Amino acid sequence: MTNIIVAFKKPEDGRSIRNILVKNGLQTTVSCTCGAQVLANADDLRSGIVICGFCFGDMTCRELGRQLSDAFEILVIASPAKWSGEDMGRLVCLPTPFKMCDLISTVRMLEETQSGRRRERRKKPLPRGDGERAAIDKAKQLLMGRNHMTEPQAHKYLQKCSMDTGCGMAEAAEMILRLYG
């Protein structure tokens, strides 16, 4: 589920947007009335979608966009007169007045963008620490000396152990070191 922050200067505007989202199966995580609240909640949530007006009492949507992590998509709902002709950068703009279906489809599109980012982050391998690298190297050396394997064979053996046991390479190396070391 994507975290959705609804943020409008006027609480009644935020309630209206929230009600539209809820009626269409989208749950909002939090409602805010100023940029500082959005930033505080965003720190706790890590990623999501911010649906907001053009300005708050303490900042504009552009300032919010500069301060907010790239893990958040920002949908600005405002009159085209306020942002027309300007480069809004990473902010997605929905002109008022809008149709409910336009709002929902835009939010769904932003959810897909969020899902794609999550998938990409999961694909990237986590960097190994010095201790993990040392354990892997030591396990390879042990396998090479004990079983007369080449370095690629020892590496492949560690990978297979890792996949067979459902643990990471470092954990598989630790198991081999405990068994044979």
Image: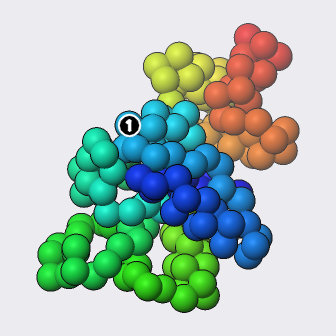
Q: How is the image coloured?
A: rainbow
Residue at 22% x, 73% y is: 82
**Residue 106 picture location, percent across and down:** 52, 79
Q: What residue type is labelled 1?
A: Ala
Quarter-of-image position of residue 26: bottom right
Give the position of the C terminus as an image quadrant.
Answer: top right
Give the position of the N terminus as an image quadrant.
Answer: bottom right
> Count the marks: how many?
1
> Which one is nearer the viewer's eye here, 140 or 7?
7
**Residue 129 picture location, percent across and down:** 49, 23
Crowding around mark 1 (Cα neighbors within 10 Å: few <14, some 14 to 19, many 20+) is some
- Say if residue 153 shows up in the picture: no
> Which one is nearer the viewer's eye here, 89 or 82?
82
> Which one is nearer the viewer's eye here, 134 or 41?
41
**Residue 171 picture location, percent across and down:** 71, 26
Quarter-of-image position of residue 81: bottom left
